Amino acid sequence: MATVFVSGTLPGASPARLAELHHVVQDEAGIRSAAFEACRDSVEGIVALLTDRIDGTLLDSAPRLKIVANVAVGVDNVDLAACAARVVVVTNTPDVLTEATADMAFGLLIAAARRIAEGDRLVRSGGFTGWTPTFMLGTRVHGMTLGIVGMGRIGQALARRARGFGMHVLYNQRTRLPEPLERALGATYTQSLDEMLAWADAVSIHCPLTPETRHLFSRERLGRMKEGSILVNTARGPIVDEAALADVLEHGPLSAAGLDVFEEEPTVHPALLARPNAVLAPHIGSADRVTREAMAATAIANVLRVLGGEPALTPVAP
Ligand code: DGY
């Protein structure tokens, strides 16, 4: 029986299975908690959340650690090189959250384009005084040109949704997809991100957060986006310069944004909070019950396998 630290409460039946087989220490406060401090000498597995920062100092404080199972597909909270140097396996939860996250991106796109959150606030505040032909006009969603930044699993799932809305899909990433896959997705590759931004009525971000993608959407780049366009971010907040985004939402060229992630979660930049044309969600891209249970099950399966001497199901390469 090994000691496994579980950061927070996980949904579904898999946490009970883990507790049958191992000594589980759990704390909502995560790895900076007194509970972790008390078990760090013996801990062999950590089920980590994206809010836990796993760095060299933390790893050095847990000499018996074999696996960090992140309950997320993104692993920007984990120092992968530091884990590799200490032979600690890192796993994530790909695939199981693809459709949920694409649903969220599409939902934010429609909500931002058609001003749904703004309309909800207006109705609740008693500001709805009747239908008029020019009242709350938004952007047409059907048939728009959608630019996807990062055409991995989630980007592709979004492209499939876009086809149903008659959209013209462009995408940009380092490597072009094989042609048959491009054809199946109905997606056109653009050599440069800026070329894509010049054409796209809406842009959805689906790349990981890395040193290269931090502030990929800088003030300059946001300023070069198409007049009236919409930005959707369900990936990671720091990919977008939040203060600059608030500015282009106020002064153009953007007409709206749909955001599920923020630079300094759970804090949101006050200038963004003040923008009525920003739809803001509290990082719930994967938050449907089925998906979250599957994420927990994947993380726990990885822990059980690695502690049992088997290869992880979904390892992340450094
Ligand atoms: C992830 O998996 O990286 C998501 O942000 C969690 O919803």
Image (cartoon, helix red, strand yellow):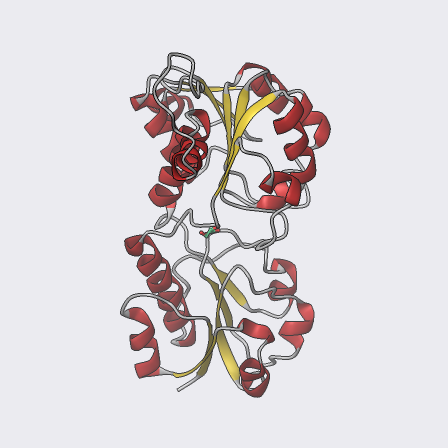
Residue at x 68%, y 23% (from the top left corner): 223
Choose between 256 and 47: the one closer to the eye. 256
x, y percentage for residue 85? 65, 66
Q: Is residue 260 visible?
A: yes
Quarter containing the C terminus:
bottom right
Choose between 25 and 61: the one closer to the eye. 25
Along the horizontal axis of the image, is 180 left or right of 150? left
Query: Where 105 falls versus 35 (above or below)?
Result: above
Query: Where 7 falls versus 125 (above or below)?
Result: below
Residue at x 52%, y 66% (from the top left corner): 89
x, y percentage for residue 23? 40, 85
Q: Is residue 217 visible?
A: no
x, y percentage for residue 154? 42, 39
Report the label total: 0
Along the horizontal axis of the image, is 246 left or right of 35? right
Residue at x 44%, y 25% (from the top left corner): 113
Q: Residue furthest right?
A: 220
Instruction: State which quadrant residue 34 falls in.
Output: bottom right
x, y percentage for residue 77? 59, 58
Query: Where 84 falls versus 108 (above or below)?
Result: below
Quarter containing the N terminus:
bottom left
Query: Where 49 falls versus 114 (above or below)?
Result: below
Q: Residue furthest top?
A: 133
Along the horizontal axis of the image, is 259 left or right of 253? left
